[in-house]
Amino acid sequence: MLKLRLFIAIPLPDNLLDNIIKCQNSLKTEKALSNSGARFTSRENLHITVLFLGYLEEKSVDQLLEIIRQTTNRVSPFSLTPVNFTFASPGAPPRMVWLNFQKNDEYNWLYRNLSRPVKDFFNKSQQKFDYEKREKLIHVTAARFKSPPVKNETDKIKLPAISHEEFLCREIILYKSILKKEGAQYVQISRFNLT
């Protein structure tokens, strides 16, 4: 039985992608990051993950599409505002660089109202789905480290500033993730307009 590795994400506008790439380029000059085996997320893979679904049998994808459609039909477009770059995950040795966004009630509503029916669907189909009940931090993963940079080295790194220009989220996308030696490849399965 073929299983697909799936996630739901918000695509980013070109101007924000340009800014992230510019910031990544400035980070590439930081010696401490190159020593940690930093891999920078490619432009085509930059997104905001709303929900990581894990593996789902291909035959069940149509049912999942309908669940997503029912939720997105009840959501209006909403604005998201980038705030700053930080080392992540919070409270742990740095393994990534995130671009964080302001908290957003509409995003949280979308997250909760996708999570519940998706969790029920996965339970009924006896497939594993890890639902995070805590408030989700809205972010884009800009870089990942093979090994965490040394603490006293990260303290010296000046993470770049980013424009706080908000963008309008008008759609979400269901992607499948194909894991390859050179990194993950993301393929769109379906787009859902927010109405």
Image (cartoon, helix red, strand yellow):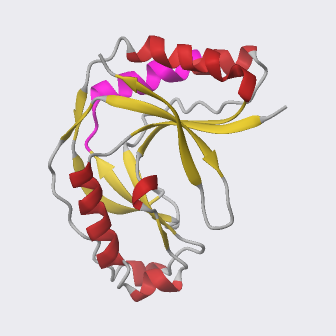
Q: Is residue 40 magenta?
A: no
Residue 141: percent from the left, percent from the top?
43, 56
- By secondary structure, the bulk of the magenta-drawn segment is best described as helix
Where 182 falls versus 1 (above or below)?
below
Residue at image location 27% in from the left, 18% down from the top: 76
Q: Which residues are magenta?
A: 102-117
Is residue 76 rendered to the left or right of residue 165? right
Residue 130 left/right relative to 167: right
Rendered residue at 67%/54% (across/down): 179
Q: Is residue 152 visible?
A: no
Quadrant where the C terminus is found in the figure:
top left
- What residue sits 76% from the left and 17% below the top? 125
Residue 112 spot, x, y in % from top left: 45, 22
193 up-or-down from 5: above or below:
above
- Magenta highlight on residue 103: yes
Figure check: 31 above or below 137: below
**Residue at the spot x=38%, y=80% of the render?**
28
